[in-house]
Image (cartoon, grey):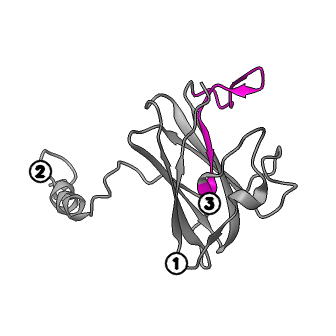
Amino acid sequence: MNTHEGPMSIRHVLLVPVALALPSTGSAREDCTGTRAPGTVRLTVEAIGLRNAAGEVAFTVYPDNPRRFLAPRGKLLRIRVPARLPVTRACFWLRPGQYALAQYHDENADHDFNRRWLRPTEGFGFSNDALTSRGVPRLRSVLFSLPAEGRTMRMRMRYLR
């Protein structure tokens, strides 16, 4: 008898209890980027205040270097995840240290931070909920420490229109 065929094969009998015993994380997949390796810790990022669940949210990590903050090719890591209400979450594996975060709500999922006359038409935010009056915040206002035990960073999404 072939044990891999039929509606109740040994394969089904063995795999179903294992699948049922796995803990539920509340989401279908883990949205992490970076390499989980010795010396890295988990940084969980959360975007709150999205006006809808259209498109995706892009989270970007920058090093403690003013020349790289928001510069083309200055990022360390980026992840894009489907927008979810009331909180959109993702995570990174990083070494403990100083970092800056930027996020934007890519409502049309075109992988571009859309603007009209230099004014953002999509939501955005920064670590420490750093405010901007004109332009972008200074690196020092968005820097945060990632300790050896990891951290969750929650950021409010801001919309100008």
Q: Could you tell me residue 35's position as x and y percent?
A: 61, 64
Q: Could you tell me residue 62's position as x and y percent?
A: 73, 56
Q: Residue at x 68, y 26 (%)?
A: 114
- Kindly give the residue lying farthest to the front in the view shown: 133
Question: SS for tag 3?
Answer: loop
Q: Residue under circle 3?
A: 34
The numbered disc on residue 8 is 2
Distance from disc 2 to disc 3, alpha carbons, whole Å, reads 40 Å
Distance from disc 1 to disc 2, alpha carbons, whole Å, reads 45 Å
Tell me if mark 3 has few (under 14), some (14-19) or many (20+) residues whose alpha carbon lies within 10 angstroms of its own: some
- Kindly give the residue lying farthest to the left in the view shown: 8
What span is in magenta? Answer: 109-128
Membership of 119 in magenta stretch:
yes
User: What is the tally of numbered marks visible in this picture?
Assistant: 3
Q: What amino acid type is highlighted by mark number 3? A: Gly
Q: Earlier in the sequence, mark 3 or mark 1?
A: 3
Q: Is residue 80 above or below residue 18?
A: above
Q: Residue under circle 1?
A: 149
Question: SS for tag 2?
Answer: loop
Question: SS for tag 1?
Answer: loop
Q: Nearer the viewer, residue 140 or 43?
A: 140
Q: Residue at x 83, y 46 (%)?
A: 71
Q: Residue at x 88, y 55 (%)?
A: 67
Distance from disc 3 to disc 1, alpha carbons, whole Å, reads 17 Å
Q: Nearer the viewer, residue 16 or 42?
A: 42
Tell me if mark 2 has few (under 14), some (14-19) or many (20+) residues whose alpha carbon lies within 10 angstroms of its own: few
